[in-house]
Image: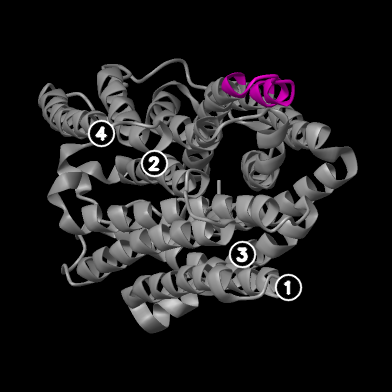
Amino acid sequence: MHKTAKQKQILLVCLAGGFTTMLDNSVLNIAVPALRSTLEADPTQVQWIVAGYSLAFGLALIPGGRLGDLRGRKPFFVAGIALFVGAGLLAATAQTPWLLVAVRLLQGAGAGLVNSQMIGTLQDVFTGPARTRALGLYQVTCAVAIALGPPLGGALIALAGPEWGWRLAFLISVPSGLATLLLAIRHLPAPTRGAPTGTRTTLDLFGLLLTAALTVTVMLPFVQPATTATKLALAAGAVALTAALIAWQRHYAATGRKPLIHPALGRSPQYVLGTLTAMGQFAASLASALVLVMFLQDGLGLSPLAAAAVTLPAALAMAAVSNLAWRAVRRFGDRIVPIGLVLALAALLLSGLAALRAPSAVLPLLLAVGQLCSGAASGLIVSPNQAQVLRHAPPEAAGVAGGILQMSQRIAAAVGISAISGIYLNSRAGTPQTAYFHAMLACAAVVALALVLAVLTNRGGRAVPAAAPEPAPQRQRS
């Protein structure tokens, strides 16, 4: 078969995988209030249902990518999409909140495994301008899925009612998932006959375990009621786990193996600062989107379809601005990321103040305007910041820098969703409007910190001279 035709088929598989996983997550946000009421889930369970997905997604990225590098991407892509679809079927039939938590963990792991193979495949198959176009199409496809998810989910719940509506929301990605599975089996390149001579798969499972333990330790105070003594003990545990992770990564690298987090990345201040910026922006974006949906339905009494209409401008604005962001980069340079963060900060603060002060009749419209600004801000931040971060990756760690960036964002999302949704769900404020304001204030604080880090990144000097790989698209609101 002609090379170009084969490349198009492989691109179709990757676009289908991105569409399937993104559609599932954008639909779920709008369905959270319905499943919360019908399953009688408490705040802790709701937080784990949403945050657990991001945690499992992030932890699956690096090992999945390494397995694909050494053993071929097709088997792991197929396994990941099969796990994702199977977990979606189980989620639709879940009868208890904790069962749904477990299934979402499985689904997140499947999505992470698929995502790591998609990005690697696009970088394997395409080079130069063709790679840039392929990654751009991937990003547009994900944006379309984000835009379609809320109205589809809202329509399902409106037509089928809360009990069946949220279950159908989990099933909505099954047809595209099955189609993706068949396309992957048929069109993805067959794996090679094992790893090259002299190499072996090094997954750094102990490093992965330490990372998971550290993330859960940080999450626990936000998802589980705890005394002051317990919180202090968890803080001490987080410090100890951080020290253990750093020591283990250095030891693992010293033995000649590939650690989960390459120590050389810590020697690039701009890479570290830029990654922390991405983590803060990603966590605040996902957490604010979830809290908004709960506030619109539980606090203001809007229907799922009406709530979806309020959130839709964010996805549309992000898709439109993402396509124009590179022109803005040519004009403003790296300053575009701080500019986007200022816009995101203003949108969060104004949305929170609107909830406190605006009449209920006009509040949904004002929040939709806030969503428009938030989506535009994400379009200005995500890809330009990623490209900037990867330019500063040390040459010896350039191959893993993108995966570490994605993993860091997903882990930050797990913690951020837990913390911010906990502020809203467990608020003792007199009204939902006040609780929403407090949650938006917390998101704004995270974005403000990200803004400071972005300014410091821009002041940090020149990038590492060696060229890093082209940036893989980052996916928002997932």
Instruction: State whether residue 71 is above or below residue 54.
Output: above
Residue 415 - label: 2
Residue 419 shown left or right of residue 178 in the figure: left
Q: Report if the CB atoms under discs 2 and 4 are less than 8 Å apart.
A: no
Q: Position of residue 9 (x, y in %)?
A: 68, 41
Instruction: State the quadrant of the N terminus.
Output: top right
Question: Quick one: label 3 or label 4, which is nearer the N terminus?
Answer: 4
Q: Marks 3 and 4, how far apart in space?
A: 36 Å
Q: Marks 4 and 1, how far apart in space?
A: 41 Å
For the record, the magenta segment spans 86-99
Question: Quick one: label 2 or label 4, which is nearer the N terminus?
Answer: 4
Q: Main secondary structure of the magenta part?
A: helix
Q: Position of residue 181 (x, y in %)?
A: 69, 27
Q: Viewer-nearest of labels 3 and 4? A: 4
Q: Marks 2 and 1, how far apart in space?
A: 34 Å
Instruction: Check disc 4 and report the residue beneath it.
Output: 231
The kind of residue tagged 2 is Val
Q: Is 333 contained in the magenta span?
A: no
| Label 1 crowd (10 A; few <14 / some 14-19 / many >=20) | few
Residue 361 - label: 1
The kind of residue tagged 3 is Ala
Residue found at the very far front of the displayed protein: 430
Question: Quick one: label 2 or label 3, which is nearer the N terminus?
Answer: 3
Q: Viewer-nearest of labels 2 and 1? A: 1
Residue 314 - label: 3
Q: Marks 2 and 4, how far apart in space?
A: 15 Å
Q: Position of residue 11 (x, y in %)?
A: 63, 45
